[in-house]
Image: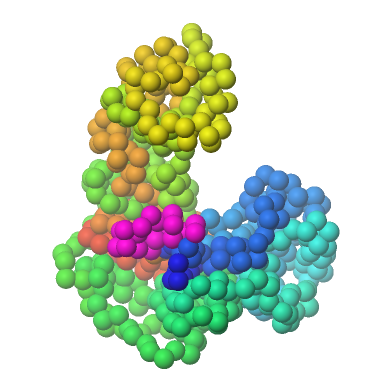
Amino acid sequence: MSLGFASYTKAARIEASERASNCWGVPAELLTKDGWFKTVHAVCHKQLDIQKGQIIDKDKESQQWLANALGVDVRVIMDEDTGYSRYDGRSAGSLALRAWDLSRARVEPLRETLRRLTATGESVTWAEARQYIQRYEDQKRMDDRCDFNDLLARFCGLKFDIDGFYDVDPEGAPPPDVRLWIFDEAQDASALVDRCCRRLAAGENVKYVYLAGDPFQSVFAFGGSSASHFMNWAVDKERVMERSWRCPAPVLELGERCLRRLKTGYWDRKIQPADHDGEVLSTAGAAAACSKLDARTPTLIIARCKYTLDAYKEILAKKKIPHAMLNDGCDTKILRAYRAYWDLEHGEPVTGEELAVAIEATPVRGLDAAYLTRGAKAAWGRPETAKAWDMVTPEKLSEIGMTSALIERIKAGKWAELVTKGERWRTAAIQYGPELATRPQIRLGTIHSTKGMEADDVVMSTQVSARIHNGEIKDQEIHDEERRVEYVGVTRARRRLIVSHDVSDYSMRLPL
């Protein structure tokens, strides 16, 4: 509990907490929920004691509140990995809020942000920006609401208005028991996030601070990040990694070739590759790439744009290969329900808590019969019921409220027909085992969402959108950002990188 690990993406936090869990023999949940393995946003949220319903996020209620506040239909999209938000739509209201978010993240005057966005084709006038931002801020004050940049600003002691920003007394307090902070993926900090990290580092009991980062992996400029903040910390010791422990020579060399196409800022760090063997392969699209995968091998399928992954998901589903999106979570209630029914089907006992989630996922009755006795679902929805049953064996199912119709379905494996996507899970469990079906080794996500992650095999789609293609032609900063995105994607691979040339009007031109 005296170690703080603050990252800028959920993926990095999950990876670190799982590694620490395996090393120390403690549950990962202890580190993330009770301890301080959190994103910077989550640390600030906890220390400010923000109540549920105050945060403006992507839920339906927040969307409606936002539309009412601005008087126009604006949809907020949260980047689930970083906490950065963006606003969907080309209306002046959407563009104004996008500029306001970026202005605060960069801690720069709004006029400068508007100039920056105009250069990339997202223009809104100063008058329109003032109108919508003032309406937004007034409504937040009236309804006691805040967004994620408000969280960070309050914690680090900044106040923003349309004409600029100024220092105020910070709110909340750094966690008092933390003696050592690790700020991982530090190149992804915005100016606002960096100020929060510096306040955490200044906690009265903090003795050590470690910053880990790679300036060539800075890929969140759309949220205001810049590697300059990481590079400008005054440090007592500095170390450049001499050797990659992850990337074999073919993978690391391709990554460096991507970086050499930067228009500014490249230097050769002379990092040596990992000792183990590896390879880089090219395939003609999703079907060819998926044919090379082994469901038991840790694998990442990554793309520049999320919609590109739909083709891969469809192929994996048809092949009945277990897979999951990175943000789906690996221990949801429905997965626990599948596993409870699987164990009961095979004559194994389950805990009361596992049975409770299985009953929650089960309909009370079907077309031909009732599956639960009267009141059973309500009873098992109360925590005290689950606690009263340490273990439930298959012989006890009638006692706890299951009818003979459901018990027969469990014995025959037909329980899977009753719960959402249960048949797909059971098919995967039969072929690959319940552990692999519950925690698939093949995961899919955007390149941005895989920051801080790695896998033995990586499939990287080359498809990009027209907006990205046109932006990197027009703007040097966007061009260099895309080279860093390529580098991040390539260097997720521990053993084998499969470059998938998907059919597209616009594609990365990797220097293979």
The reply to whether residue 288 is visible in this rendering is no
Q: Viewer-proximal residue, 217 or 357?
A: 357
Q: Magenta: predominant secondary structure element?
A: helix
The reply to whether residue 232 is visible in this rendering is yes
Estimate the x, y position of residue 487 in percent, counting from the top left.
36, 68
With 226 as the anchor, is 407 left or right in this view?
left
Q: What stretch is highlighted in magenta?
A: 14-34
> Is-magenta flag for residue 21?
yes
Estimate the x, y position of residue 63 in percent, counting from the top left.
70, 49
Residue at the outermost top position: 368
Residue 156 versus residue 454 in the image, above or below: below
Residue 137 versus residue 382 in the image, above or below: below
Estimate the x, y position of residue 39 in percent, counting from the top left.
51, 64
Q: Write the residue at 68% across / 56% down.
A: 51
Quarter of the image with the N terminus is bottom left
Residue 428 versus residue 236 in the image, above or below: above
Q: Write the residue at 61% across / 60% down.
A: 85
> Is-magenta flag for residue 46?
no
